[in-house]
Amino acid sequence: MLKQVFIIIVGLMSNGGIRQANLKMLFERAKEYEKTSFKGLFNFIRFIEKLKMGNSDLSQAKIIGENENVVRIMSIHKSKGLEFPVVFLCNSSKKMNKEDLKGSLLLHKDLGFGPKYIDNIRKIECNTHALKAIRIKLRDESISEEMRILYVALTRSKEKLIITAVRKNEEKELDKKRKLLNLYKTNNNKISLNLLRAKDSYLDWIEYSLLNQELQDKKYEEIDFNIINSKEFLRDDEEEQETKKCDFSEYNDFEKLEEKLNWKYENEFLSKLPIKTTVSVLKKIENERIDFFELNNKNVGLEETIPEFLKDERITASEIGTIYHLVLQKIDFNKVNSEDDVKSFIQELVSKNFIRLEESEKISSKKIFEFINSEFAENIKKAKKIYKEKPFCLEIPAKEIFKDDNSIGNILVQGIIDMFYENSNGNLVLVDYKTDYVEHDENELINKYKKQLQLYKQALEYGTNKKVEEVYIYSLYLNKAIEC
């Protein structure tokens, strides 16, 4: 009695039918559980918890049976084996997905694989015969599968099948199909396979079938084909809207109008301020007085992702500088006793594909040896620890960059420190390599890279909690260490 009352109370709640069904499902699960060797409420609760933890089937109970008089929306695949009195096949004009046939490498279980031919020297690519063959085979198999799916869709109804589609210029499309059917006539009056391959929607195949019967003076009596113009059921808003006239004679305050049209957001600067930038961008701002936002729009200081076959074969001064940095990063200062050692190391980098042969020819082994053999480098060799090419990120106030007290917020600055080492005092020494051309004027380099080195020093002291005792620029062009 209490059980029946409880079921009635639950049924009066919101979504009562689903609640009652869930309780009945729980009751059935409990009955099945009692048939096992485990007994008791505690073990049953643990059993349900394990089901939940294992993501087992604890879905909501179904309150709609298979024979309920409701509308069901499902894919064609889900409808296999089912029948309904009335079936709608909607959006039959939708194009089939052929993206899988556009890949640079296609695979087939019988034909193997077909790649594109790519010539990096001539900078061309083209389809191989293997790729074309597999593409044709996969396309035919895809069409065959879609036809089987269409057959499933057309055979689900018991009484009526309604097929809908949306298309522009349907009459023009039908005339075109009639001409193609006449052009590709077959001896047995069947539709040419070439026509079916050329089309990629259910509607096209159905129309070809209907038009082929029409050309043979036959007609499917059970089929009604209707073209409905959208104007027949869409309201013409233009006719129903009332025409409103506006009198602008009163609005003649042109100064106020100009003020509104030329209005500018007072915090426009903040809306363009990036979250992150690079040391290279800040150096451009400091030294060349170039607009910050113009630099960011051009991605100055960020690596450009240009394909190898589009890159200019000429090696730029910036790229030469990068190569020097790579050599100095990889080379062991303590293993270099002569210029030949430097040459051998550069050839080793070429053999390991770190640099290209033409790039290695731009490197002066003499300059590198003079640096490693200098008194300045001797201090580096004696260091407790040496760090090379260390990236960093540093958050700094925007007003420090733009020298404007109204600039609020912080900017994340990223960069890479060429080298720093720990001296005998336990403090740090910062070294930055430069390959710039200078006319024997040390101050030119100091002024140019002052801001950059300040950021490096600030980042090191913040990240290591150690004092940067000395800061140097080593000019490979001057073969000289310059203290900043």
Image (cartoon, rainbow, N blue to C red):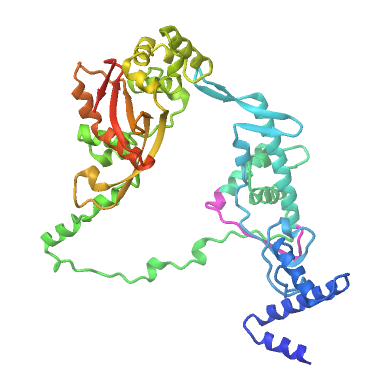
Above or below, comparing residue 446 to residue 276 in the picture: above
Residue 222 seen? yes
Q: x, y percentage for residue 229?
A: 53, 60
Which quarter of the rendering shows the N terminus? bottom right
Q: Residue furthest front?
A: 425
Q: Residue furthest bottom?
A: 1
Which quarter of the rendering shows the C terminus? top left
Q: x, y percentage for residue 410?
A: 30, 49
Closer to us: 176 or 130: 130
- Residue 267 placement, left or right of 325: left
- Residue 169 placement, left or right of 411: right
Residue at x 77% of width, y 74% of height: 42
Residue at x 64% of width, y 51% of height: 203
Kindly indicate the quadrant of the structure image that contains residue 101: top right
Closer to us: 244 or 180: 244
Kindly indicate the quadrant of the structure image that contains residue 458: top left
Q: x, y percentage for residue 119?
A: 54, 20
Closer to us: 404 or 177: 404
Residue at x 72% of width, y 68% of height: 49
Residue at x 66% of width, y 28% of height: 114
Residue 216 seen? no
Above or below, comparing residue 440 to residue 404 in the picture: above
Q: How many marks?
A: 0
Q: Is residue 24 magenta?
A: no
Above or below, comparing residue 7 to residue 340 in the picture: below
Q: x, y percentage for residue 264?
A: 21, 55
Kindly indicate the quadrant of the structure image that contains residue 191: top right
User: Residues in magenta?
Assistant: 155-172
